Image (cartoon, coloured by chain):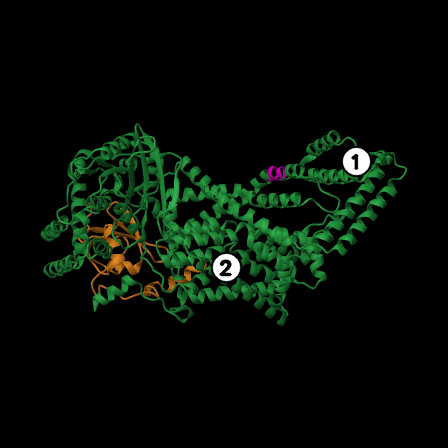
Chain colours: A green, B orange
């Protein structure tokens, strides 16, 4: 193939087993820019990138990490299909140098498929440290393919690898060695001879590979043959009879025999090429694991680790946001300056929408420091190898509830304690090999307490549960885990019942120190992805919610009513100012509006300024930029200035009150307000009024907005300066709301469906709109059910909010223990997985 | 973590719920090996995906493996095989027929 600019182009596939350092090598080989897409029709990531080597353009595609090339798992099918369809010019087989024997089994399969293979012995440093002395020359001689030693993490051996790719990609080397199948060899050779006479077959795959696959009875290989050949039946029958004859004669299945031959040869090659100088010594990782995985110490270390993550990312991250928030607030003030000026009662639509968008973006960007820390810590856990140990420790519990040891990472990302985000959580489910457990994880990760749920909890707790703050927060942060486990179990015995499952066979990688660049790269990548995916959705949805909250707007009569009140207030202002020498400075309406706006901006700037110095700097700033308004704004001893400032304050307060009333009326009559109101008949059992409905509806767009919307709905007039807690408390207590309502709201919010960004991620990860819809509908019904039960039961039994919370908590806990210990939770037994069913059939 | 104790009460009876009787019948299987014991794999029972996965990870007849430990809650198990440590659930380990290897302390 040649490029547009006449350069020769070669395609390289990177194959290899998991934990062989394939991704690191991919990065070292191709550099930063990479393209991530999906393989056709499946949700397996396809990473590709190119680099230039003289007159060559080399495209490198990272195949999914697989141990083998059978058709049992999705990844293996994808990798195999790519090799058959795309016929890469070079296949780079990445092998963990310290585990040559296992790595070679894949190498044999790749060679057998007829691919031009280069074997890369990666992680040579680890092998050396473990005392393995590997001799490359005999290995090359035995395999008849080039072998390159590398250390991907330190970019060692990359030039040699590029040279080898160039050599193999541009010219044919000697044919690779074939594996002799011993007692099966005659049958393989016979079938291979037949197949090699068929051009439609040999043009696509290697005859020898197809022969072995047909003898194994691989369904995909049979399908491939049938697609190429009109009369494939005869060949398939011949393979089947050969298989039967062989199995009858040697009492072992063809598949086992082939695996055995491969393992035998791999062991033989390892014995001649590798010298284990530390044989018999206990490996370092094992010595560490004696402590970390000790029966009694393991839970302790695990709790410490999760606590450490929580402390460093959430607690310290929040501290960091105090530093970064003024930057974001400054950005908002900048936008406020730049957008068209506000009117007295009405703002230009551009200004209102612009500020709304900036606010939405800011709430999101505010979390960036937290995510950077969280993702870096998780990258460290993954790179050191401790993450696999966490899965090992927790698999027993998680498996019982239909989940998987590897569900731990998604749950931590989603926010097990408090603080996380379901979007990266759902994304991280990619690594779970068991389909049923994976879907159960995807559907339960959103129950975790993501960062955006916290503000609403804090708000309600500060109003209704002041004395029992800690206890309620504890209830909320653990009840979500309980709910997730119960729901996971419920789903896996019902809707997920017949999903594909997989055995739990997981490697516990050797511990090694992560590199700074590797950790930073992963952390920045994931954070950036969060900003991109969540950011675009949140900003887009914010615009929609804005429209839903603003329109259709006030009736002309009400408009006139507010206009009249505004004019009265302005008239009062001028009356007060009569005789005041400063009155000249605001001779006309326009100047007055300028003054009121300057006053509001000045107040905002003062609020954002930290410390007396910064506050004085704001004063100086305004004295300079608005010299004519200075006496109104900056505190002074002059009598005239003081009375003018007082008059201005009254006017500004009236304006704010009017604006608040208008906004509230606008929301009441808005589309969203109407929906909230029309939902009252359904939500009244949970005691949600339309205001709460509107807040909960808008929180579907982004959870953060629930508090922001409540803030608008319970907005205050300027002079009061009370916190939202006080305002909501006062209004709600007046309306007859109690802590019981708050408990219902919080529980609903805990079980509430994922935000829009998460549901989109669910769609991406499950590749199905049905599951996406399910992930919205099911939690809504569940949440509303629980909230209604809490309020109705609580008010029937005359329980207080905290009593009801405790009751719910212990009921859930009891249910959890019940489900955990009884043999057939929810009265149903899981179907026996396919691979077990067959086993039973074979045994009888 | 308060649940752990209660979980452990059941450990003697294998695992309730999804436990299936050992496919190897009365013959010794890896599931029943004591931590620290070295065994030689005799045969794999079970079919399809699980069998292939075990073969890929190196659970091939005549290979020697060491049962390293079981997880704090008794399941899954950690097996030392070749140069690697692999974790499998007890149900999977029940499909691996083994014989004990006498260790001459070298």
Q: Using the rendered image of the protein, determine whether residue A286 is visible from the camera's viewpoint.
A: yes
Q: Quadrant of residue B34?
A: bottom left
Is the magenta region chiefly helix, strand or loop? helix
Q: Position of residue A168 (x, y in %)?
A: 23, 34
Residue named by callout 2: A776
A663 shown above or below A122? below
Which one is closest to the eye, mark 1 or mark 2? 2
Quadrant containing the C terminus of chain A in the rendered view: bottom left
> What range is drawn magenta here?
A325-331
- In the structure shown, which secondary structural element does the residue marked by tag 2 occupy? helix
Crowding near the residue tagged with mark 1, few <14, some 14–19, many ≥20 C-alpha atoms within 10 Å: few
Mark 1 or mark 2, earlier in chain: 1
**Left or right of A458: which side holds B16?**
left
Residue at position x 43%, y 40% in the image: A522
Q: Position of residue B80 (x, y in %)?
A: 27, 49
Q: Residue A635: which numbered mark, if any?
A: 1
Residue A579 part of the magenta-drawn span? no
- In the structure shown, which secondary structural element does the residue marked by tag 1 occupy? loop
Residue at position x 60%, y 69% in the image: A792
Crowding near the residue tagged with mark 2, few <14, some 14–19, many ≥20 C-alpha atoms within 10 Å: some
Q: Are marks 1 and 2 in contact (CB under 8 Å)?
A: no
Q: Residue most toward the top? A: A54
Residue closest to the eye, A377 or A678: A678
């Amino acid at each position: 193939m040649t490029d547009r600019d006449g350069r020769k182009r070669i395609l390289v596939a990177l194959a290899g087993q998991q934990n062989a350092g394939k991704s690191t090598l991919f990065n070292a080989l191709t550099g930063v820019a990479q393209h991530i897409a999906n393989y056709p029709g499946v949700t397996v990531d396809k990473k590709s990138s190119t680099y230039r080597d003289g007159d060559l353009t080399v495209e490198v595609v990272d195949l999914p990490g697989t141990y083998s090339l059978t058709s049992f798992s999705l990844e293996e099918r994808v990798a195999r299909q790519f090799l058959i369809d795309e016929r890469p010019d070079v296949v780079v087989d990445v092998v963990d140098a310290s585990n040559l024997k296992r790595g070679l089994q894949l190498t044999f399969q790749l060679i057998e498929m007829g691919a031009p293979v280069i074997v890369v012995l990666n992680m040579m440093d680890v092998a050396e440290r473990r005392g393995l002395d590997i001799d490359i020359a005999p290995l090359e001689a035995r395999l008849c393919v080039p072998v390159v030693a590398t250390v991907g993490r330190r970019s060692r051996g990359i030039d040699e690898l590029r040279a080898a790719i160039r050599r193999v990609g541009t010219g044919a080397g000697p044919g690779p060695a074939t594996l002799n199948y011993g007692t099966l060899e005659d049958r393989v050779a016979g079938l291979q001879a037949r197949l090699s006479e068929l051009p439609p077959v040999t043009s696509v795959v290697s005859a020898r590979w197809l022969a072995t696959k047909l003898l194994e009875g691989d369904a995909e290989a049979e399908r491939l043959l049938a697609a190429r050949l009109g009369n494939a039946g005869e060949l398939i029958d011949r393979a089947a009879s050969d298989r039967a004859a062989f199995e009858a004669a040697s009492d072992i299945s063809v598949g086992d025999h082939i695996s055995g031959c491969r393992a035998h040869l791999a062991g033989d090659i390892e014995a001649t090429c590798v010298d284990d100088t530390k044989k018999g010594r206990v490996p370092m990782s094992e010595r560490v694991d004696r402590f970390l995985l000790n029966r009694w110490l393991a839970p302790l270390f695990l709790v410490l680790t999760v606590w450490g993550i929580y402390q460093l990312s959430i607690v310290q991250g929040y501290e960091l946001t105090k530093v970064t928030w003024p930057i974001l607030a400054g950005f908002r003030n900048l936008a406020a300056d730049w957008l068209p000026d506000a009117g007295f009662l009405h703002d230009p639509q551009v200004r209102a929408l612009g500020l709304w968008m900036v606010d939405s973006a800011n709430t999101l960007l505010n979390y960036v420091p937290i995510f950077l820390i969280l993702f870096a810590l998780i990258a460290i856990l993954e790179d050191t190898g401790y993450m696999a140990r966490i899965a090992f420790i927790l698999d027993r519990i998680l498996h019982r509830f239909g989940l998987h040891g590897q569900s731990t990472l998604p749950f931590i990302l989603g926010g097990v304690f408090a603080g996380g985000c379901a979007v990266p959580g759902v994304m991280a489910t990619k690594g779970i090999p068991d389909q049923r457990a994976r879907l159960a994880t995807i559907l339960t990760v959103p129950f975790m307490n993501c960062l955006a749920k916290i503000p609403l909890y804090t708000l309600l707790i500060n109003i209704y549960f002041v004395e029992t703050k800690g206890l309620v927060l504890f209830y909320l942060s653990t009840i979500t885990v309980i709910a997730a486990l119960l729901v996971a179990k419920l789903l896996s015995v019902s809707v997920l019942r017949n999903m594909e499952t997989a055995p739990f066979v997981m490697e516990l990688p050797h511990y090694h120190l992560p590199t700074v660049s590797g950790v930073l790269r992963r952390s920045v990548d994931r954070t950036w992805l969060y900003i991109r995916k969540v950011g675009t959705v949140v900003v887009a949805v914010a615009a929609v919610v804005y429209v839903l909250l603003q329109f259709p707007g006030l009736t002309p009569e009400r408009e006139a009513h507010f206009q009249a009140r505004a004019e009265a207030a302005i008239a009062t202002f001028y009356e007060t100012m009569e005789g005041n020498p400063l009155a000249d400075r605001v001779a006309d309406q326009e100047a007055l509006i300028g003054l009121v706006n300057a006053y509001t901006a000045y107040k905002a700037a003062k609020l954002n300024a930290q410390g007396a110095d910064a506050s004085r700097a704001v004063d100086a700033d305004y004295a300079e930029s608005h010299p004519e308004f200075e006496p109104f704004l900056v505190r002074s001893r002059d009598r005239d200035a003081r009375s003018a400032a007082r008059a201005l304050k009254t006017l500004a307060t009236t304006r704010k009150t009017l604006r608040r009333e208008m906004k509230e009326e606008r929301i009441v009559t808005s589309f969203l307000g109407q929906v909230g109101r029309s939902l009252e008949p359904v939500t009244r059992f949970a005691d949600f009024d339309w205001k709460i409905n509107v807040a909960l509806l808008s929180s579907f767009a982004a959870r953060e907005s629930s508090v922001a919307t409540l803030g608008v709905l319970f907005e205050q007039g300027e002079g009061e300066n009370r916190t939202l807690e006080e305002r909501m408390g006062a209004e709600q207590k007046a309306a007859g709301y109690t802590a019981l309502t708050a408990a219902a709201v919080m529980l609903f919010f805990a079980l509430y469906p994922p935000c829009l960004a998460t549901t989109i991620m669910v769609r991406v990860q499950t590749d199905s709109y049905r599951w996406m819809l399910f992930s919205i509908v099911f939690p809504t019904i569940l949440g509303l059910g629980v909230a209604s039960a809490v309020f109705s039961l609580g008010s029937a039994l005359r329980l207080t909010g905290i009593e009801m919370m405790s009751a719910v908590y212990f009921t859930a806990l009891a249910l959890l223990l019940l489900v955990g210990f009884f043999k057939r939770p929810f009265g149903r037994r899981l179907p026996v997985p396919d691979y077990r069913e067959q086993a039973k059939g074979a045994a009888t | 973590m308060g649940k752990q104790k209660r979980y452990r009460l059941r450990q003697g009876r294998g695992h309730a719920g999804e436990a299936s009787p050992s496919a190897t019948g009365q013959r010794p299987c890896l599931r029943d090996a004591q931590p620290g014991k070295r065994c030689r794999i005799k045969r794999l029972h079970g079919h399809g995906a699980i069998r292939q996965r075990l073969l890929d990870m190196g659970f091939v007849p005549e290979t020697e493996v060491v049962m390293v430990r079981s997880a704090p809650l008794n399941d899954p198990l950690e097996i030392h095989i070749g140069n690697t440590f692999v974790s499998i659930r007890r149900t999977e380990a029940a499909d691996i027929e083994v014989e004990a290897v006498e260790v001459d302390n070298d």
